[in-house]
Amino acid sequence: MEKPGNEAVIVVGSGVVGLATAVVLAEAGRRVRVWTREPAERTTSAVAGALWWPYRIEPKARARAWALESLSVYEELAGRPEETGVRLVEGVMGETRLDELGPWAARVPGLRAATTEEYPGSALWARLPLLDMPTHLRLLRERLSRAGGTVEERTVTDLAEAEAPVVVNCAGLGARTLVPDAAVRPVRGQLVIVENPGIREWLVTTDPAAGTTTYVFPQPDRLVLGGTTDEDDWSTVPDPKVAAEILERCAALRPEIAGARVLDHLVGLRPVRDTVRLEREILPDGRVLVHNYGHGGAGVTVAWGCAREAAGLVGPAPSR
């Protein structure tokens, strides 16, 4: 156990929320250790579509505030896309109207209603952060290292194993057994990665009748196609039939995708909860436990806002 006065913080989880939280704490002067069952490259965050947009996340008011705070961070990082993995990219959010959004939408760059010539139905144009997650996760690890933080690969079966004055639980779906919290459940997402035939704009569209959401996200070296929202499905094995359906739906939107060479198939399990759990708990022995999990498919969207609030719950670093 850490010696009294060292004020070490252990962050459990190395997805985008866990690493962002660790970075905020370390850059504020805390001595941070990240414990992770698997490296960031194998977390759900690594296979996220990673378009900034408040998506299926509660409570709405807090989530919008977290999202806007994160938007400001991403806008700054977008000035160095090769280093940060963040670009501001124009695209269309289908089946969405301005009057459905709250006051937060006024802060979104380039937001306007699409014309009927641009999209057959209600839709919005916007210029949103789109993240290349492998690059962005590498940036977070590098920032953490420069601030003196460390990442340790170890399997945690009980939060009590993290014997430090302060523990931050960013375990995502792992919180289901670690807390334990049965309210956290998986929503499976499957992606197909193809060569980019020259597409520069992202596109998201939903079909309520079919219950599908289809999206096309251009990255510098590839095109990310999706997707699925399979409730309570724990399988991480790509389904060839689902992959074929994703390709068909995307090609219907952008015909040039039909001939694109498939590079990879990916699956991620979104850690969904009815509401995000972001709160401070005092353990019986007096140690501080801060929970920061349950972000579902919006982890990238709210990561920095949640990280800063979690750091505030931890409290300031002790004076040296």
Image (spheres, grey):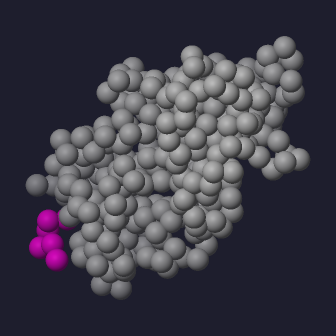
Q: Which residues are magenta?
A: 1-7
> Does residue 157 appear anywhere in the picture?
yes
Predominant SS along the magenta part = loop
Task: Examine the image and state in which quarter residue 201 appears.
Answer: top right
User: Could you say where residue 293 lies in the image, as x and y percent from the top left?
Assistant: 49, 61
Point 20% across, 64% down: residue? 8
283 lies left or right of 54: left
Q: Is residue 289 left or right of residue 268?
A: left
Residue 97 in which image quadrant: top right
**Residue at (86, 17) in percent of width and height:** 116
Camera-side residue of 314 and 90 = 90
Residue under the image location 64 percent in, 41 percent down: 226
Taking depth in this image into account, of 88 and 75 the one nearest to the observer is 88
Q: Where's the C terminus, which quadrant?
A: bottom left
Residue 228 in picture, x, y percent from top left:
67, 50
Q: Residue furthest toward the bottom?
A: 284
Q: Is residue 3 magenta?
A: yes
